[in-house]
Each structure stands twice: as C-alpha cells, then as structure tokens.
C-alpha cells in the first residue's frame, strides 16, 4: 500500500481493497472485546518481506526460533496461527510450513489477539489471525515485481493479481512466482572434558546455499445476495528446493593440544519438493436477527526430500523422506443478538491423517514408517453482554476433545474450559480490559512418537538423537490478563500497559538424558510452571504534535518464568527465557518528495537456560534493523527499496552439559545476512 499522504490520489477502485476492515486499526482495537493489535495492509507492505513466514517473524512481541514463533518467553507452541479464523491440527507440520511460504501480498491484515476466550481458547498465550485478501467486485489489476540479494545470492518475486465481477459476483486471481536463494553459514566449536582433562576439541565451518523455486495460485470467488454470501477459495502451492553445503572440520590431535589441524570434510546435497492443494468453502446466511456461517476446507499436502552426505574420511550416507498429510477442517457458527446480549455458538471438527516414511542407507541404516492421526472436536458458546454504556462482559465455555495416534501410541484428552472477560471504559478514551480463562495444550503427533532422528555428528548431549515421548501428558493452564489503554484524540493512536500471568500443569520442555549408550533429546513433563510479565505498547500518529505524516510505534515484553521441577525437587527458571523482547518502528510520509520511508528495530534479550548440575545455555542478545523507502512514480505506480537485517546480525548460542565429572561444550554461530530488495508496485 502506498503512503497515506498519496493514497487520496489513487483511483476510487483502490478503496475497495480495505472494505473488510471495520475502520482504522486504532478504532478496531478500541472496539474489540479482548486486547487486539491490527497490522493493516500498508503496515505489512512496509515490512518489505516476500513471504507470510517472514511477516510472522516481524510481529510485535513475537520471536522466531527453531521451532517456529514464540511469545512472552514461552518456547513451545506459544503462538497460535489462524488463517481466516481457521486453526489447523497441531500435528500438521507441512500445513504451517507451506502457509509460511505463501506470498505476503496475499494478506489483507494481521490480527494479534491476547487473552483467553471461548472462541479461540487459551492453549496459546498469543493468537495471530491471518486475514487473507477478499474478492473485489470491480475490475482492477495489481502487479509486484521484486528483485534483490540476500547476502550475495539473488532473490526475486513476481505477483500479478486480477480482480473483477459483476452484480453479486466478485473474483480475484493472484499468481505468484518466487525465487529464493538463501546463503547459510555456521561455525561450531565442541570441547569435551573427562575427569577434568580435555578429551575432544573440534571446530566445524559450514557454508551453503538453499534455493527455493515456488509457484502459488490462490483464486477466490464470492457470490452475494443481499447479506448472504458464498466464497470458494482453491489454493495451489508447488515448491522445489535444493540445498548444497560444504563443511570443513578441524581438530586437536591429541585433544589436549593447543592448535587445530584439518581432520575431515563433508558435502551435503538435498533436493526437496513440497506441494499443497487446498479448497475452502465458506458462507453466511441471515435469518431474521440471526447470522449462520460455516466453512469447510480440504487440504492435501505432500513433501519429499533426498539427502546425500559424502564425508572425508570416506563415508557416504543417504536419506529419503516422504510425507503426506490430508486434513479436513469444518466449522459452523451462529450469532444472534438478544437485547443487550450478543450470543455466539460454534462447532469445529478437525481430522488429520499423516504418513511419514524415511529410509537411511550408508553409514547409518534404518527404515522408519509412521502412521499418525489427530482428531479434534470443539464446541463453544460465548455471550457479549453490554451491562452499561462503556461496560461489556464476555463469558463463555469451550469444550475440547482431542485424540492422537502416532505409530501405535494413542491418547485422548478433553476439557471444559470457562472464560471471562470485561471491557470497561470509565471515562472517554481510557479503557480497562481483563480476562481469565483456562487452556488445554495437547502434545504434537511427533512429540509422542518414539521414532528416532539420529544425530549427524558423534552422539553426545550437545548433539543428541531426537525422539518423542509416548507418555507425554497435555499441558493444562489458567491464564489471566489485565490491560490499561489510553486512546488519543482524533484516533491519533493508543498507549497500552498489560500484565499477564499463566499457570501451567504438566509443563513441557525438551530434556537430554542418557538412555543406554545413546544421548536422547525428548519432551518431558517437568512440573508446574508460572509465566508472568508486563507488556508496554503504543502507536502514535504525530500530526497533532507538529510532525506531519509520521507514525511511531513500539512494543516491549518483560517476561518471567519459574518451573517447580518435580524430578530435581527445585524451583528454577524455564528454559530459554529472554530478558526482554523489544520492537520499535517509525514511518513517515514526505509529500514534497513523493515518498515515504520507515525503520523497524527489533531487540531480543539474552536468553538463558540454567538446570542445576545438568545444563547451562545462553543465546546472546540479538539486534535487527529493517528499513524501506517508497517513491511514488505516478498515482498508480510505486518504486520500493527495502532492506532486512541491515546489521547482518548473527545468532550466537553457547551450551554446556554436565554429567558426573564430564562436560560437553558447544558454541554455535549462525551467520546473519543482509537482504536488499527493489520492488515495482502498480495498481490499475
């Protein structure tokens, strides 16, 4: 989207782009029952990224780690991702991965929701709803052609979207081609000590390139008859990937020596193919004062990968993997106003079947075959009761029954969970919100499977085999939020302060322990955990302060976490808890230059793991800086320059394991690369 100062110059048809929004992001946040932050399309485009996954990594209060997104210092499934209100099965690994590869231009807006509700549940501390673009009734065309570099590797994206319709029929046809070349670089340093004497010192340097070629086609067709509507949205995604990397190893011989010399190398080659076919049908029907809505989506996903590793001293290993997922996702909903009440009732059903096959040959030989299934049955009822002008009470019940079956390991659990929220505006522009609710977080399918993923390097605590835990129990949580918000005059912005607390039974973390002669990393129920902290956020448009056309925004999370570890009999900090998470941004329109620009700063504080007598890990603080400059060539054509990770910040992690008189140390540095992109954006 162009800068706000020049939007008025665009053809009237462009205004249709935002018809799905309730108003400005500030007004929508103010009207919401629970705490809600909205990123509009202009905010998304100003991020200067190419995929939805990259958008998720730039959200305020959200960090990206190896397992996906996390918030409030919680590492495991702390962010729930919805697509147009639809939640995928927890075991749908490819579903989440492929959605992340879709073009960011498919997004209309992003809603970040905090607090429990019957509608969304309380399993995650933060819910992110990705609202996709809708069909437009008038003829228009949008074009984006982007090219640039990530490190020294070229990247490109081409998206063409046509919109049209007549009468009650509207359609949109977006087509996207992506070329991503991502350089990779890592350095590791291993040092093992036995009875106080160093028994191993190795260093590895690995460099490579990961290439994606992707095609996405996602048409949408909508038929409207008054207030009734029917939308059909098929999606095709096809992606081919190649990875090639070379590793050089140095070692001390003997291990107590003070210098390192060449001890071997390894070349790894991977070819992969991912495909998704999806059909979503949704509709709304008004009957009197009641609105009935329903949706059904059918998803077929397939992923294959072939990996060859050739090492020196001579050894060769290969790995072939084939994964298939079929997911059916159904929902029905009724909304009905009754006096000062707005009653909503919903039913949801999710059925996922997943087949995973792996064949290992060469230095390691094995055949793994997993057949997994997940079924979720959900019913919820929620009432928004307007007690007084400025006071709304929202209360409800949510029932979940979830069954998992992974290679013969089966479990089923359910829970009825109440929720209560209050929205109170005691005086104009001052708003208090508070919510209280329960949540149920089931294990993922791979977390209960005992199938091994062996370590590539020599087996040790710092590079252990990975397995699931057939005895893993679901987490049961109680969540509390309290937020104070101050809305500025003329919708100029909002300032907010939030306190949150989450008590969790059967808190789950991954733990490394010796099983026979192998070190194995499994998820374990460690005990009761308490997460709490404060969040400060604000968004201010500075026109009334004399700074015309500028917007300043910021978000700060200060997390705390404690675990009552039943195995060790101690109270300790939760693993990988960061000291803080901070983001800030500035956007400004420069009408005299027919331009706008923006800067975004993200700071992730130092994360620490400290397990007495067993493990200590530190992930160093990380700072990233992004920016963009947009130049308006004419009322319909923009030229955008954007940069990501302009500081080329690395990710540095140091881990030490202890057992008896032995220690294992690993220091890893994953290289960060700048990305620069030039995009031509047009709308007609």
Image (cartoon, rainbow, N blue to C red):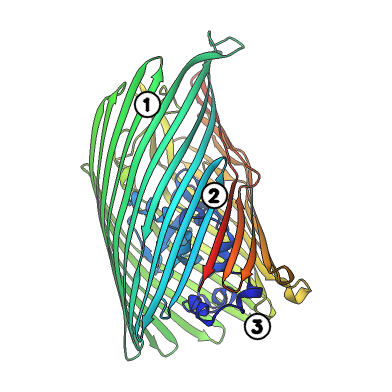
- Circle 3 sits on which residue? 428
* Along the line of sight, the residue nearer the viewer: 418 or 549: 549
Instruction: Give the label on residue 291, or none.
Output: none
Residue 542 x/y as whole percent: 73, 71
Quick one: label 1 or label 2, which is nearer the N terminus?
2
- Circle 1 sits on which residue? 309
Give above or below for 220 relative to 562: below
Q: Residue furthest top?
A: 254
Quick one: label 3 or label 2, which is nearer the N terminus?
2
Residue 484 x/y as whole percent: 62, 70
The secondary element bearing badge 2 is classed as loop
- In percent of the image, x 32 and y 24: which residue is there? 317
The secondary element bearing badge 3 is classed as loop
Quick one: label 3 or label 1, which is nearer the N terminus?
1
* Along the line of sight, the residue nearer the viewer: 190 or 661: 190
- Circle 2 sits on which residue? 73
Q: CA distance from mark 3 to mark 2?
A: 34 Å
**Residue 571 appears in the rendering:** yes
Quarter holding residue 231: bottom left
**Residue 90 appears in the rendering:** no
Quadrant where the N terminus sits is bottom right
């Amino acid at each position: 989207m162009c800068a706000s100062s020049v939007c008025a110059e665009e053809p009237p048809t462009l205004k249709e782009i935002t018809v799905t929004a309730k108003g400005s992001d500030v007004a929508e946040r103010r009207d919401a029952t629970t705490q809600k932050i909205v990123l509009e399309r202009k905010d998304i485009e100003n991020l200067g990224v190419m995929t939805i996954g990259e958008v998720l990594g730039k959200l305020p209060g959200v960090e990206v780690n190896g397992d996906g997104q996390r918030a409030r210092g919680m590492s495991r499934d702390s962010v729930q991702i919805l697509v147009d209100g639809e939640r995928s099965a927890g075991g749908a690994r490819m579903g989440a991965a492929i959605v992340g590869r879709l073009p960011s231009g498919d997004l209309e807006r992003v809603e970040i929701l905090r607090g429990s509700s019957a509608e969304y549940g309380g399993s995650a501390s933060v819910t992110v709803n990705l609202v996709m673009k809708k069909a437009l009734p008038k003829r228009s065309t949008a074009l984006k052609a982007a090219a640039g570099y990530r490190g020294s590797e070229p990247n490109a994206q081409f998206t063409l979207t046509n919109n049209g319709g007549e009468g009650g029929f509207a359609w949109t046809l977006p087509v996207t081609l992506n070329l991503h070349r991502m350089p990779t670089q890592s350095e590791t340093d291993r040092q093992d000590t036995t009875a106080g004497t160093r028994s191993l010192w190795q260093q590895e340097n690995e460099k490579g390139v990961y290439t994606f070629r992707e095609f996405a086609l996602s048409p949408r067709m909508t038929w409207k008859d008054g207030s009734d509507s029917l939308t059909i949205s098929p999606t095709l995604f096809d992606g081919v990937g190649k990875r090639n990397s070379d590793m050089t190893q140095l070692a001390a011989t003997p291990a107590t020596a003070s210098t390192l010399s060449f001890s071997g190398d390894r070349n790894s080659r991977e070819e992969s193919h991912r495909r998704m076919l999806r059909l979503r049908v949704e509709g709304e029907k008004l009957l009197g004062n009641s609105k009935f809505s329903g949706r059904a989506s059918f998803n077929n996903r397939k992923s294959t990968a072939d990996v060859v590793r050739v090492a020196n001293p001579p050894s060769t290993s290969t790995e072939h993997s084939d994964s298939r997922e079929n997911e059916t996702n159904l929902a029905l909903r009724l909304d009905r106003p009754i006096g000062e009440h707005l009653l909503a009732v919903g039913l949801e059903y999710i059925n996922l079947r997943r087949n995973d096959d792996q064949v290992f040959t060469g230095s390691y030989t094995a055949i793994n075959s997993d057949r997994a299934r997940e079924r979720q049955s959900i019913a919820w009822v929620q009432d928004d009761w307007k007690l007084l002008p400025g006071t709304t009470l929202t209360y409800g019940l949510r029932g979940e029954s979830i069954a998992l079956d992974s290679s013969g390991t089966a479990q089923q659990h359910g829970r009825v969970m109440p929720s209560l929220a209050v929205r109170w505006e005691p005086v104009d522009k001052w708003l208090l919100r508070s919510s209280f609710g329960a949540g149920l977080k089931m294990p993922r399918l791979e977390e209960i499977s005992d199938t091994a993923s062996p370590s590539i390097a020599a087996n040790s605590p710092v590079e252990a085999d990975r397995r699931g835990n057939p005895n893993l129990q679901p987490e049961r949580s109680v969540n509390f939020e309290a937020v104070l918000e101050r809305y500025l005059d003329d919708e100029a912005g909002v300032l907010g302060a939030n306190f949150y607390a989450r008590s969790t039974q059967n808190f789950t973390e991954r733990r490394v322990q010796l099983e026979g002669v192998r070190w194995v990393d499994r998820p374990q129920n460690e005990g009761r955990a308490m997460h709490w902290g404060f969040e400060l956020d604000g968004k201010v448009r500075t026109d009334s302060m004399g700074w015309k056309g500028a917007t300043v925004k910021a978000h700060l999370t200060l997390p705390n976490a404690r675990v009552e570890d039943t195995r060790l009999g101690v109270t300790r900090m939760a693993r990988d808890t960061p000291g803080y998470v901070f983001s800030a941004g500035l956007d400004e329109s420069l009408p005299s230059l027919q331009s706008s620009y923006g800067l975004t700063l993200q700071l992730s504080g130092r994360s620490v793991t400290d397990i007495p007598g067993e493990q200590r890990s530190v992930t160093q603080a990380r700072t990233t800086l992004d920016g963009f400059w947009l130049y308006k060539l004419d009322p319909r054509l923009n030229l955008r320059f954007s940069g990501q990770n302009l500081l080329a910040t690395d990710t540095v992690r140091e881990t030490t394991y202890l057992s008896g008189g032995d220690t294992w140390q690993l220091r890893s540095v994953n290289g960060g690369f700048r990305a620069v992109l030039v995009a031509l954006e047009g709308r007609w």
